[in-house]
Image (cartoon, grey):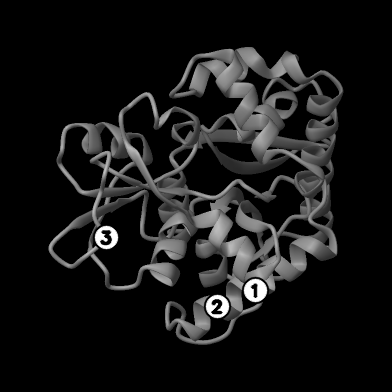
């Protein structure tokens, strides 16, 4: 009998690239029966908190809050240098942030929102919106600043917006670690052999993607906000790397740094350590 696994990932190109072979069953599912959902990252976070998934992509900010219930899988993470969210201004010469202004963030449990809290705590009013609504809202003048993620990292100049700060670069400067954005978590309630099979299938899917990088483009186009293939592959180049295949010790140190800084800043009520499944 196959074991059903409710798996959810984001619609961003790095996930649809990494999971293309799993989605299309081009790799062995190892006796599992995956039921897949594709959602915005904050929707993933919310539904994971609600207990809807056996395994899911989630922000590492959300994973910090769920350490008692989930473990992080070694494969499938977005972690790297020069991959961080951008703090953008609606005006070409945006003024320094102050409490009369509004900043749009892509969801309260996203790592992007956590970084804004760490580096610009109580500087502006914050409003949470779906990530794909941030740049259009800035273009319409409906907010002063926005924390931009995903494909918008490559297209903000064309939108006439200004770069206030690269939050990922600031993280790297202060920690000397790659920025951990999000990863795949599995419920601790799953048997170890099931978690191991999920991890192995994801690892195989990544190896498939790495061996034939353009095979995933049809799947990527299906879900992307930006349909230009060059932009989609730029996204893959930025967010899929050796730590996506295996977090390793570098990933563990980066996650420890995130936990410590969130605790010191009072974002988390107590120190929590993310466990990476072995």
Position in image of residue 193 (x %, y %): 84, 55
Relative side of 42 to 228, left or right: left
- Circles 2, 1 touching at the beta carbon (< 8 Å): yes
* Residue at 47% in and 48% down: 44
Q: Is residue 275 above or below residue 127?
A: below
Q: Specify which label sits upstream in the sequence, 1 or 3.
A: 3
Pointer 2: residues within 10 angstroms few (<14), some, or many (20+)?
Answer: some
Label 3 to label 2: alpha-carbon separation: 24 Å
Residue bearing the label numbered 3: 96
Describe the element under mark 1 as helix, strand or loop.
helix
Label 1 to label 3: alpha-carbon separation: 28 Å
Q: Specify which label sits upstream in the sequence, 3 or 2.
A: 3
Which of the pair 176/236 is nearer the observer? 176
Which of the pair 128/36 is nearer the observer? 128
Position in image of residue 180 (x %, y %): 63, 57
Q: Is residue 221 above or below residue 192?
A: above
Q: Quadrant of the C terminus?
A: bottom right
Q: Is residue 277 visible?
A: no
Which of the pair 123/2 is nearer the observer? 123
Residue bearing the label numbered 2: 261
Q: Is residue 82 visible?
A: yes
Residue bearing the label numbered 1: 257
Q: Is residue 176 above or below residue 5?
A: below
């Amino acid at each position: 009998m196959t074991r059903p696994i409710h798996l959810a990932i984001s619609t961003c190109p790095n996930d649809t690239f990494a999971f293309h072979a799993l989605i299309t069953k081009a790799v062995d599912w190892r006796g599992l029966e995956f039921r897949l959902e594709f959602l915005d990252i904050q929707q993933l976070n919310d539904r994971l908190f609600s207990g809807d998934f056996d395994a899911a992509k989630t922000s590492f900010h959300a994973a910090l809050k769920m350490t008692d219930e989930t473990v992080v899988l070694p494969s499938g993470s977005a972690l790297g240098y020069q991959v961080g969210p951008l703090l953008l201004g609606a005006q070409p010469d945006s003024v320094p942030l102050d409490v009369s202004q509004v900043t749009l963030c892509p969801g309260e449990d996203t790592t992007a929102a956590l970084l804004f809290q760490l580096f610009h705590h109580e500087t502006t009013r914050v409003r949470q919106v779906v990530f794909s609504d941030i740049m259009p809202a800035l273009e319409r003048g409906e907010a002063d600043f926005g924390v931009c993620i995903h494909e918008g990292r490559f297209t903000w100049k064309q939108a006439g917006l200004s770069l206030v700060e690269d939050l990922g670069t600031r993280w790297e400067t202060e920690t000397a670690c790659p920025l951990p954005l999000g990863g795949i978590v599995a419920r601790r309630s799953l048997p170890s052999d099931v978690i191991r099979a999920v991890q192995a299938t994801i690892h195989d899917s990544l190896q498939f993607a790495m061996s034939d990088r353009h095979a995933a483009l049809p799947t990527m186009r299906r879900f992307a906000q930006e349909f230009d293939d060059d932009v989609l592959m730029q996204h893959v180049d930025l967010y899929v790397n050796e730590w996506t295949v295996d977090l390793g010790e570098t990933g563990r140190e980066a996650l420890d740094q995130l936990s410590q800084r969130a605790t010191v800043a009072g974002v988390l009520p107590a120190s929590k350590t993310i466990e990476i499944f072995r």
